[in-house]
Image (cartoon, rainbow, N blue to C red):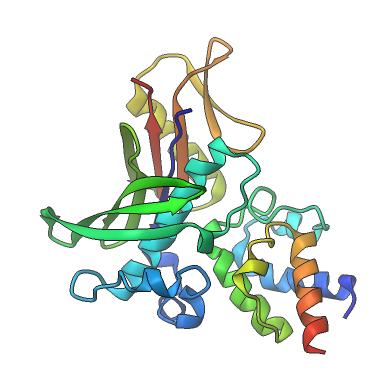
Amino acid sequence: MISAGNDIVALNVIDIQRTQSPAFYAKFITPTEFELYNPNEITLINFVWLLWSAKESAYKYLKRINSELIFAPIKIKVVSLDIVVSLKTENVNNYRGWILAEDMSLPFLSVTMPESILTVITQGDAKWNFLKIEASDYENQSKAVRSLLLNDLKIPNVSVEKHPTGYPILIKNGQELNIAVSFAHHGCYVSYSFQIPK
Amino acid sequence: MDRKEILSELKKVLAPYTESKEMLAGINEETDLIKDLKINSANLVDIIIDAEAQYNIEIDFDAAEKMYNVGNCIDVISEKINKTA
């Protein structure tokens, strides 16, 4: 079964002071995971939210496979995290890592930018994109992320609906397309990832 | 503190994290924090930390993972309050 998972964190709406408190990040980052933190390569704030977004992305990926899964970030383990030096752009860094959860090993890509952190589970051939929007209310986020995906997909007469368990599905001529899609939104940022089977 | 009182306090904890103020006013034990109240998952840890302060309890993550709907939140908070009493 193909799946997709992504997440985006808008750094301008997170509580910076709280993020840096061990009482906060210890709720979802284990001491073993914290050993991946290298202050020469990433700020503490970016590290904390990168791990959150990686865990959330993995959860979305796995929830599509196991609809009974409950979000328990402490049980989704980030086991490696490496900066991708060759792609370095000013104020933008790419990181690659691996997650272990539900007896699966999932690769991910995270991009830290000045205002946001985006993570995508890169199992298979995942495509992704993100967008900054004007209004951050739920309705606008939801509309914007659907529109971004449909514009990029370029498949005519496709609509986005929700599977009863909550993940997005694509419908064309009354039939569900075999494309796994994941949506994310936070503050003024929306993102998607999808995977089409080869 | 009974379940009704916990629910009343819980509304104050959840208020900063939801746009659905009407839905918040009418929450019941079945209300889902993400699906119904449209709370962003990035705020779930904030809610746990705020609940700890509001009820003077400590919520470990084994308990926290159950807090996806209002009824489960009340279960966890009630259990922790009884332990510290």
Q: Quadrant of the N terminus of chain B?
A: bottom right
Q: Is residue B82 above or below residue A45?
A: below
Left or right, B14 with reference to A61? right
Residue B40 picture quarter: bottom right
Which residue in the rendered view is the most extreme toward the front?
Answer: A103
Q: Position of residue A69 (x, y in %)?
A: 61, 47
Can residue B32 be spotted in the picture?
yes
x and y percentages locating residue B2 in the rendered image: 90, 76
Q: Which residue is found at the position 55% from the left and 57% from the top?
A: B41
Q: Quadrant of the C terminus of chain B?
A: bottom right
Q: Is residue A194 above or below residue A114?
A: above
| Residue A92 located left or right of residue A153 | left
Query: Residue A90 versus residue B75: which sits nearer the camera?
Result: B75
Furthest toward the bottom, the residue is B85
Picture residue at 41% right of the left edge, 14% below the top: A156
- Out of B25 and A60, give the one closest to the viewer: A60
Res B8 → quadrant: bottom right
Give how far across and how far down residue A92 sits, in percent. 20, 58
Q: Residue at the top extreme?
A: A173
In the rendered view, would you say B14 is above or below A7? below
Comparing A113 with B2, the one in front is: B2
**Left or right of B14: which side holds A148?**
left
Against A17, residue A34 (above or below) is above
Q: Is residue A187 visible?
A: no
Q: Where residue A13 sits in the image (x, y, percent)? A: 44, 66
Residue in the image at 39% along x and 64% along y: A49
**Image label count:** 0
**Residue located at (72% from left, 73% from top):** B12
Q: Is residue B65 left or right of residue A193?
A: right
